[in-house]
Image: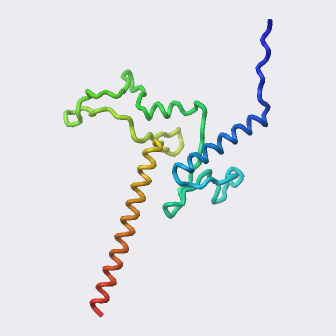
Amino acid sequence: MPEAPKPTLDASKKGKRSRRKGARLEVEFAQIVGGIVVRLSGALRGDTKSNDVIQPEFGDDWRYEVKGRGSGLKTLYRWLRREMSHGVQTVKHTPEATPVAQGGLGKMRPPQALAVRADNSNWLVVIPLDEWLRLLDLFGLARQEAERGWIERAIDGLRKLKEVS
């Protein structure tokens, strides 16, 4: 007996599912980084709000384009886990690796960032979210320190002016 054909979704339902998944990912990412989801950002191409998520923390807004793929990004994840092949040898996490001081590579650790470039394109840097959040924290602390230093220098300058007059 022939098998019944599998039900397929019509194009409008596939599109709706895809949009919902995209919106769900945008909200999730915005909550993690403390950003704002820009609704209908795809319709605003060229506008200042044409990105999916905006993080207005650091003066000049950080803008994010959020993408999700079912399994289309497996290679990036594998590279970040450092299970890629280098020639004939595969690099793996080995605690008994030769220390750097003895001419070895030291204990192999997964990379903190992945640099990728397609032919005739710009470089991209891919980093795990926990590393990105750590960098944002460091950037925020450095900015606070710089601002505090500027304020302290300004106060010292005012004190010196007051002493002179």
On the image, the x and y values in percent for residue 142 come to 38, 60
Measured along the vertical axis of the image, is residue 90 above or below residue 2?
Answer: below
* The N terminus lies in quadrant: top right
Q: How many marks?
A: 0
Quarter of the image where one finds residue 92: top left
* Drawn side of residue 15 relative to residue 81, left or right: right
Quarter of the image where one finds residue 113: top left
Residue displayed at 49% across by 61% down = 58
On the image, the x and y values in percent for residue 153 come to 33, 76
* Drawn side of residue 101 relative to residue 31, left or right: left
On the image, the x and y values in percent for residue 76 come to 50, 34
Q: Residue most toward the left?
A: 102
Residue displayed at 44% across by 53% down = 136
On the image, the x and y values in percent for residue 141 come to 39, 59
Q: Residue most toward the top?
A: 1
Measured along the vertical axis of the image, is residue 80 above or below residue 164?
Answer: above
Residue displayed at 62% across by 53% down = 37
Q: Nearer the viewer, residue 123 or 6?
A: 6
Q: Nearer the viewer, residue 117 or 4?
A: 4
Residue displayed at 50% across by 40% down = 117
* Drawn side of residue 138 relative to residue 74, left or right: left
Q: Residue most toward the bottom?
A: 165
Measured along the vertical axis of the image, is residue 97 above or below residue 55?
Answer: above
